[in-house]
Image (cartoon, coloured by chain):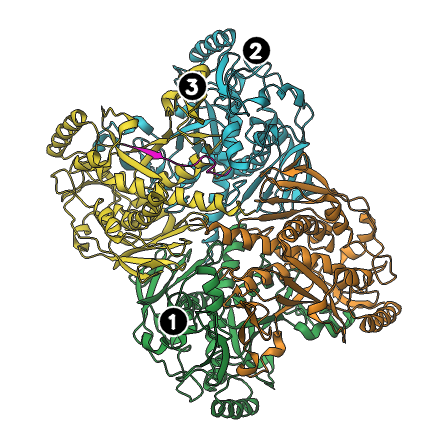
Chain colours: A orange, B green, C yellow, D cyan
Amino acid sequence: MAAGNTFGTILKFTSFGESHGPAIGGILDGFPSGFEPDMEFVNDFVQKRSPSGSIWETQRKEKDEAEILSGISNGKTIGSPIAFIFRNKNIKPQDYSEINKSFRPGHADYAYFKKYGIDGQSGGGRASGRETVARVFAGALALDYLRKMNIEIFSFVSAIGSVNAEFDPEILDKNTIESSVLRCPDSVAEKAMLDLLENLKKENDSVGGCVSTFLKNVPAGLGEPLFSKFNAALSQAMMSIPAVKAIEFGAGKDGLKLKGSEYNDAMSMNSGKISFDSNHSGGIQGGISNGNDVFFNTCFRPPSSVGKMQNTVNRSFENSELEIKGRHDVCFVPRAVPVVSAMTALCVLDLLLLNNAYQIL
Amino acid sequence: MAAGNTFGTILKFTSFGESHGPAIGGILDGFPSGFEPDMEFVNDFVQKRSPSGSIWETQRKEKDEAEILSGISNGKTIGSPIAFIFRNKNIKPQDYSEINKSFRPGHADYAYFKKYGIDGQSGGGRASGRETVARVFAGALALDYLRKMNIEIFSFVSAIGSVNAEFDPEILDKNTIESSVLRCPDSVAEKAMLDLLENLKKENDSVGGCVSTFLKNVPAGLGEPLFSKFNAALSQAMMSIPAVKAIEFGAGKDGLKLKGSEYNDAMSMNSGKISFDSNHSGGIQGGISNGNDVFFNTCFRPPSSVGKMQNTVNRSFENSELEIKGRHDVCFVPRAVPVVSAMTALCVLDLLLLNNAYQIL
Amino acid sequence: MAAGNTFGTILKFTSFGESHGPAIGGILDGFPSGFEPDMEFVNDFVQKRSPSGSIWETQRKEKDEAEILSGISNGKTIGSPIAFIFRNKNIKPQDYSEINKSFRPGHADYAYFKKYGIDGQSGGGRASGRETVARVFAGALALDYLRKMNIEIFSFVSAIGSVNAEFDPEILDKNTIESSVLRCPDSVAEKAMLDLLENLKKENDSVGGCVSTFLKNVPAGLGEPLFSKFNAALSQAMMSIPAVKAIEFGAGKDGLKLKGSEYNDAMSMNSGKISFDSNHSGGIQGGISNGNDVFFNTCFRPPSSVGKMQNTVNRSFENSELEIKGRHDVCFVPRAVPVVSAMTALCVLDLLLLNNAYQIL
Amino acid sequence: MAAGNTFGTILKFTSFGESHGPAIGGILDGFPSGFEPDMEFVNDFVQKRSPSGSIWETQRKEKDEAEILSGISNGKTIGSPIAFIFRNKNIKPQDYSEINKSFRPGHADYAYFKKYGIDGQSGGGRASGRETVARVFAGALALDYLRKMNIEIFSFVSAIGSVNAEFDPEILDKNTIESSVLRCPDSVAEKAMLDLLENLKKENDSVGGCVSTFLKNVPAGLGEPLFSKFNAALSQAMMSIPAVKAIEFGAGKDGLKLKGSEYNDAMSMNSGKISFDSNHSGGIQGGISNGNDVFFNTCFRPPSSVGKMQNTVNRSFENSELEIKGRHDVCFVPRAVPVVSAMTALCVLDLLLLNNAYQIL
């Protein structure tokens, strides 16, 4: 979609703002009118992407409060675009004077420079985790709408580095997830993850991980073949999140090792309804939801900003070294959980509205 | 993009046709005018997705010849939509009379029924590998254009079941790949893969696999933040291919286990140009190509049609059993290679044109 | 929408084909599934754009029969793209050998040459009335759908040259319109129009005219602010028809001479429903239908091909003269009537589906 | 384009804000990077849509100053979305307490109510001239870009009520236009127009008019067939402006009365370049610019708010009377001139970028 800052077909989310500019914000256009969002739910949700205060997270702290500029009046959506902004309060451009001289390894600096011909933070300020605050706000409105349709989205940390969590999809519980500092439903794994993060903090290094997502009560029939398949749309949504490098549905990458007779999700009648004996397909067949839980994993690379000396090239195109100072996230996967939920919600509500368009007679 | 049959922003590919209808076809709109496609290259490429005649592949054989209806005149593109059709010659609806009574496990039958309320093949005929012939033709035109810009796309089989191929990205060679019956650059792995396929053929079972893709000489600066990131666009493209269940870029899912200091691709000057010491990011940073090879894996589940008795539900919503007779693919990953290349080419040429739009002054 | 051959947001119509290529065709994507089109109605409608055999019309005659390639099975739409083609049977490229040497005055030849750098008919073959056959077929499907929702579209000739028709919007009748050779509801005016056309035929000259359209029973609430206003969408649709040079809604251009107190359509309750005392706004206020008849005029310039010697420039960029031989339309406004209806129907059904998307709770 | 608040394909303008909410604003996405806008020019241009202080204009006065939130850094565009807001300072919701009880004749109140089910100003606040401030700001950036490419846009008042201006397209001058209180290049007509406005002011009535626009130095080849024709795109742009009811290109509606031999714009070589002997086509042939001046008229109905008692229906669906008090525009055509220029500039720059996308080899 041209310049790339808009997501969705019927429900369109447009994001704007640089991390070091005056504000981050967005427009959510195409939201049904007459809906009364639970703003406490929305604002609480936005806070979920703030650092928890743990030592392995960035200390850039700003209470993010949206100012709603349009689209909601007397507590209700009115059918016009919902515009909102978050002021950037904690900008210290001087922090960046040193690193602006070189292209930071693993960052978007060089690629953005080649694309836009822009020096310094101004361009790279767009490829920043800060930008996701707008997605989380817009996504919270969509989440609120979906839960009133009885559609629930569960996202949680399922892996950090080599530590994998175990969980039972049947008994996922939001309170359990949210009471975990790492948003991990497996408390044993969580302990090992915390140990890993503390060690990496001491090493000034970082690590990636994985967010798993289950969608419950999604009606069968969502997604549009061929290029707006449910999994194609979700993949675009997930890959749009900074640092995401892989996505897999259902049995995912490991599923290719199964035999077809093992992989196929057999169907049977159960109390007058169709049920599936397994869910290797992740609730999506031929790109369309089949009524089973939709399930996928979103995988994040480690944060690029590490406190170790690294070889790079400076903006005069000479070899140089760079040590990125200050506190940075050792791992941003726990904070990415609400971002994954938010993008999922925007995607699902868009597909719901799109599917609804055709149910006219 | 609404009903889902169109891919791309500037270069728009629209697909139509059911596997059991009169024809499969497509429109490629937005192709630059004045280009003289090498039709021998194009037609040869289309044949690559036909079965090789090996026992582990479907025997549905039709020489696929496109009829070009518009957009090319006197051997040159003229700027108008390039429409083309492939007649379906080998239609035997009676083959399907039995299986039409039940929802085939692992297939799109049930999801399509819930979406469109349509009985029988008519709906499911869209969610068929047959449809990809249109993509391959359109993609071949894009591939031809890209190679004249010196951009090369290498796709090949890197895994079938648990057998992984080894390869050196620096010495990929199209002849080696194409002379392999499995399109696998590792002849040792290929032998093990063939053994696996023969055994599964005897078992009437199937297996999945993985296609790896390298893009060489992609200029830095392609992809549009946020939602049209190079990796987001490629993910949408890959997930639109039937049976794709996972995609990963660069170090992929395994990359999350690396430390940031290991993952970051250090840069240095090399003969006056920037080079990267590694390519964990898969040539994409912040969603924008960085000039390194773009690299990703596309993972396919096993084919759903297996010759074993399976439990399912029939269209009267009763438990039933189904044995899918006839010859089916044990594995369609080798035949998926040109489909992956084709969708990649459509995606890359679209991003090239899109990026070019802004280079105006 | 990029290369320009697609119309609509939810219901997407894509057109392809050159007037002198193998076929003209289209894809109608996003049509609701489960609809049983009345193919006799559709095919009859397509014939309406063929020449009537009158001396003032082109003699290029081909019975236009669509071949449906996909999207309709067992007489019903199945939710997949409806692709169809019309073979061009009557191609005589030699007719064009002379005129290909020069840019025809009033035609798109020179503008297309500057855009696509293409010589000869190949490019200009797109800017041809022939292309509208695809629109008329797709539009007929939409018309058939709309009339089953009780929405009726009346288009007719309201002016040719300086001769204006009089008509009463309350008693428009399709039979009266269609039984008129000029599709004009005013038989007195029609006689004057026919005289004018015969005189111009003798002079080897041509003339333009105007098609008026009334939409009855359009529900209030269609159209999307700001840029997808009902009138904005219809204007795009009308201006996409070859030779259209003006469009006006309701009181139109003359309405600017009224005082606001005269122009405003006063409302009152009438048998429990809102009615309007006038319809200067053409049934659209703030871009949204208000439940009154939607009314607009579409104005066509005279055909460019006239049998008189004209000054022009040849393709070697020298001054030259050109006399366009053969039989050409003196006026194509009567034949444009079904094209106007068809584009209107595509536009209205698209807006209906779009509006329906949001009616979810 | 779905919810309707976005215009353009490559250069995308999205508008938000209600006239009685906290702010009006917009996002201009896809603007080329590295451009240094002349902010004095931009801000001066924005002021042009403010009331001049004449008695026949509304007295709602607010100095409109944009706050730029993103996309411009150190005075240059950086390739990311340009977001900006105008705070609404002069909100007096109490002014509307009375009129909120009834649907105002000629306004969008009733149509919006039927669409969104929203009572009161909240919905109707979108269908307000106030919204155009965002268009004018975004359009000024596009205008600034275009004039640096030597493309100039001249818009001016050519008719108010029955008073028509005369002008010579060859000697249009921005200073002359802007020094006229009515933005009319014909000082004799302007005097008659002023007399008309003063009389209508006394009558508490209103009147419409027409804005003419000439584009000079537009390169041949802009516009995309079929549905993104230059005239189709401009028509969508113009019809999106509040109160526009007609648009005509070149000879326009009167052109249909000409004979083809008169209408056709003959071509000849002139100092080595092609020139046209007339411009009845308005510089557009087959939907593509031909290098001649692009010329069109945009016609506005009279303002709906008049100080006379009118019959209407109240929100309890009873017949009622309504007298709209306060000062309102007798005619908003002079203030619409910059809005027409702005939308034209957005449209032309979008088509330029779109056309540029294909010029790749």
Taking depth in this image into account, of B241 and B233 the one nearest to the observer is B241
Does D203 sit above or below residue C341?
above
Amino acid under disc 1: Val
Judged from this view, the residue extending furthest toward the front is A271
What separation in Å lies between label 1 and label 3 (alpha carbons)?
61 Å
Whether residue B46 is visible to the viewer of this picture, yes or no, is: yes
| Residue D1 picture location, percent across and down | 49, 45
Q: Which residues are magenta?
A: C211-225
Q: Is residue B346 left or right of residue C208?
A: right
Taking depth in this image into account, of D139 and A116 the one nearest to the observer is D139
Does D5 sit above or below residue A248?
above
Does C11 sit above or below residue A200?
above
Which subunit holds the residue at mark 2? Answer: D
Amino acid under disc 2: Ile
Residue wearing tag 2: D55
Residue under the image location 48 percent in, 62 percent down: B114
What separation in Å lies between label 2 and label 3 (alpha carbons)?
22 Å
Residue wearing tag 1: B42
Taking depth in this image into account, of A353 and C46 the one nearest to the observer is A353
Q: Is residue A177 left or right of residue C101?
A: right
Q: Quick check: is C219 in the magenta stretch?
A: yes
Taking depth in this image into account, of B289 and D57 the one nearest to the observer is D57
Residue wearing tag 3: C263
Q: Regarding mark 1 in the picture, which secondary structure is present there?
A: helix
| Residue D16 picture location, percent across and down | 60, 37
Q: Are marks 2 and 3 on the same chain?
A: no
The reply to whether callout 1 and callout 2 are in contact (CB within 8 Å) is: no
Q: Quick check: is A261 in the magenta stretch?
A: no
Amino acid under disc 3: Tyr
Q: Residues within 10 Å of mark 1 (few under 14, many from 20)?
A: many
Which subunit holds the residue at mark 1? Answer: B
